[in-house]
Amino acid sequence: MIEERIWKIKSFEELTRKELYEILKIRQEVFVVEQTCYYLDADGADEHAVHLWAESDGQILAYCRIFEPGIKFTEASIGRVLTHPSYRSLKLGKILMNIAMSTIEGKFRTPNIKISAQDYLLKFYSDFGFRATENKYLEDNIPHTEMIKYS
């Protein structure tokens, strides 16, 4: 069990090399290896993101990246949402999403958020007020739906 968990929020420029390495590592573990999605994770967007994660003893337990309006969508957005497989029972994803939405409201002064959700997580995101749009698509052979949360 994790004794102490630290939440961090940093811009790309503020990340240490070690933190960036750990972020890229966990994203590859979850999205490339676990979900067998062979894609270029280092997509050039990290430099424009705010990175949010929980860690304990240097290991990332949960992570997402946040974008101000106009970067990914007209609205602010949250992406690369994950929880380390060994820590999913801790329900860190819920805490992560609440912190991400609060960060968007505080930092970017907007409650409007658009996400690209894997379809098996539609209920999870709807619990935070996101509504599915008609925009459904396959991304890396995984069904996705665009979701929006307005104030």
Image (cartoon, rainbow, N blue to C red):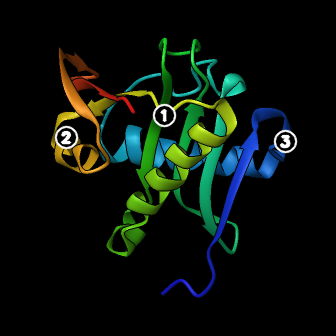
Circle 1: element type: loop
Name the front one of labels 3 and 1.
1
- To which quarter of the image does residue 113 belong? top left
Q: Which sits in the foreground, 30 or 33?
A: 30
Q: Which residue is mark 2?
A: 122
Q: Which residue occupies 40% across, 37% down?
A: 32
- Residue 50: x percent and y percent? 67, 36
Local packing at callout 2 (Cα closer than 10 Å; few below 14, some 14-19, many 20+) is some
For the residues labelled 1 and 2, say whether their Cβ atoms are less than 8 Å apart: no
* Residue at 19%, 15% in the rendered image: 137
Q: What crowding class fits label 3: few (fewer than 14 Cα within 10 Å), some (14-19), or many (20 or more)?
A: few
Q: Position of residue 131 (x, y in %)?
A: 22, 32
Q: Quadrant of residue 53?
A: bottom right
Spatial CA distance of label 1 from label 2 is 19 Å
N-terminal-most mark, 3 or 2:
3
Q: Secondary structure at mark 3?
A: helix
The C terminus: image quadrant: top left
Q: Nearer the viewer, residue 80 or 40?
A: 80
Task: Give the Cα separation between the discs numbered 3 and 1.
Answer: 25 Å
Q: CA distance from mark 3 to mark 2?
A: 32 Å
Q: Which residue is pictured at 84% across the width and 34% down the height?
A: 13
Residue drawn where x is 40% and y is 47% of the image: 30
Mark 2 lies on a secondary structure that is helix
Residue type indicated by callout 2: Leu
**Which residue, given by chain and number where applicable, does mark 1 sit on?**
111
Up the image or down, 150 lies above or below 58; here it is above
Does label 3 or label 1 sit earlier along the sequence?
A: 3
Residue at image mark 3? 14
Kindly indicate whether the residue at mark 2 contacts the one at mark 3 (C-beta within 8 angstroms). Answer: no
Where residue 124 appears, as percent x and y from the top left, is 24, 50
